[in-house]
């Protein structure tokens, strides 16, 4: 999904108008199994194509993730799947390389630049997809249980500070993405519902994982149901 989004973005960046067409802000909440998120996103975008049905925007998004008893697994792609090239998106994790970090109460804040793509079916109904590209994360230090088979030890961890969208498990840090439908109940107000795919990541204070190579990064992948509201600030026809 992320590889497809990046391909579409490259096409859209060559087609948008030179003048901004739309500015908006939205608030979204996501919920999963003992986990959830709240986010706020500001978009500055363009509409293009026949009848300006397509939308491309650059956005800034702040996301807060909360989780209870969440398992964070070995993050680096070269360990988890044994590959770092584009084909990593099709690779399965190598079970014997995967260790876990159990954190009782996760809390990560991420501020990222995001890319938004949308399509207007009519004046009322639209769909959209967005994905974080680069930014940073912060949050309190947490004490977790590092698990390697039946062996466990306590360790401290903090949210991985730098976020960067690459390809699949090559990603760094905490990144948010959404796929949704939106209904505009007024010309400048809309409600949206869909799914949120959220990567969150912790870095331990030492390289607690030693095999097949030293590692201190652990990732959780969350699929959340999401609902939100959008306020259009400026729309230039």
Image (cartoon, rainbow, N blue to C red):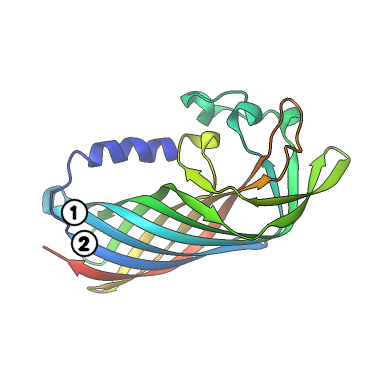
Counting residues from the N terminus, which is met first, the one under dot 1 or under dot 2? 2
Give whichever of 11, 190 is nearer the camera: 11
Give whichever of 70, 52 is nearer the camera: 70
Q: Residues within 10 Å of mark 1 (few under 14, many from 20)?
A: many
Give residue 124's position: percent from left, percent from top: 25, 67
Q: Which mark is residue 19?
A: none
Asked if labels 2 and 1 touch by Cβ distance under 8 angstroms, the answer is yes
Identity of the residue furthest to the front in this view: 205
Q: Which mark is residue 47?
A: 1
Instruction: Tell me: residue 74, above or below residue 92.
Output: below
Q: Residue tagged by mark 2?
A: 22
Q: Is residue 54 left or right of residue 90?
A: left
Q: Is residue 8 left or right of residue 167?
A: left
**Image quadrant occupied by the N terminus:** top left
Q: Residue at x 68, y 39 (%)?
A: 216
The quadrant in which residue 42 appears is bottom left
The quadrant in which residue 229 appears is bottom left
Q: Is residue 34 left or right of residue 130?
A: right
**Image quadrant occupied by the C terminus:** bottom left
Count of residue discs: 2
Q: Residues within 10 Å of mark 2 (few under 14, many from 20)?
A: some
Instruction: Tell me: residue 211, above or below residue 31.
Output: above
């Amino acid at each position: 999904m992320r590889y497809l989004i990046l391909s579409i973005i490259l096409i859209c960046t060559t087609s948008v108008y030179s003048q901004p067409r739309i500015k908006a802000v939205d608030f979204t909440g996501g919920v999963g199994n003992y986990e959830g998120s709240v986010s706020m996103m500001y978009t500055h975008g363009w509409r293009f194509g026949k009848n300006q049905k397509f939308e491309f925007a650059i956005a800034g998004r702040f996301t807060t993730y909360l989780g209870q008893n969440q398992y964070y697994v070995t993050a680096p792609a070269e360990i988890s799947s044994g590959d770092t090239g584009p084909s990593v998106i099709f690779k399965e994790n190598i079970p014997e390389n995967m260790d876990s970090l159990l954190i009782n109460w996760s809390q990560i804040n991420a501020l990222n630049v995001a890319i938004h793509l949308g399509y207007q079916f009519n004046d009322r109904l639209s769909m959209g997809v967005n994905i974080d590209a680069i930014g940073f994360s912060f949050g309190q230090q947490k004490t977790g249980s590092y698990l390697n088979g039946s062996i466990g030890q306590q360790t401290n961890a903090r949210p991985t500070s730098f976020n960067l969208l690459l390809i699949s498990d090559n990603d760094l840090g905490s990144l948010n993405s959404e796929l949704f439908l939106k209904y505009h109940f007024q010309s400048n107000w809309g409600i949206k519902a869909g799914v949120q795919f959220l990567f969150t990541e912790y870095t331990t204070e030492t390289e607690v994982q030693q095999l097949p190579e030293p590692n201190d990064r652990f990732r959780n992948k969350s699929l959340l149901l999401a609902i939100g509201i959008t306020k259009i600030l400026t729309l230039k026809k």
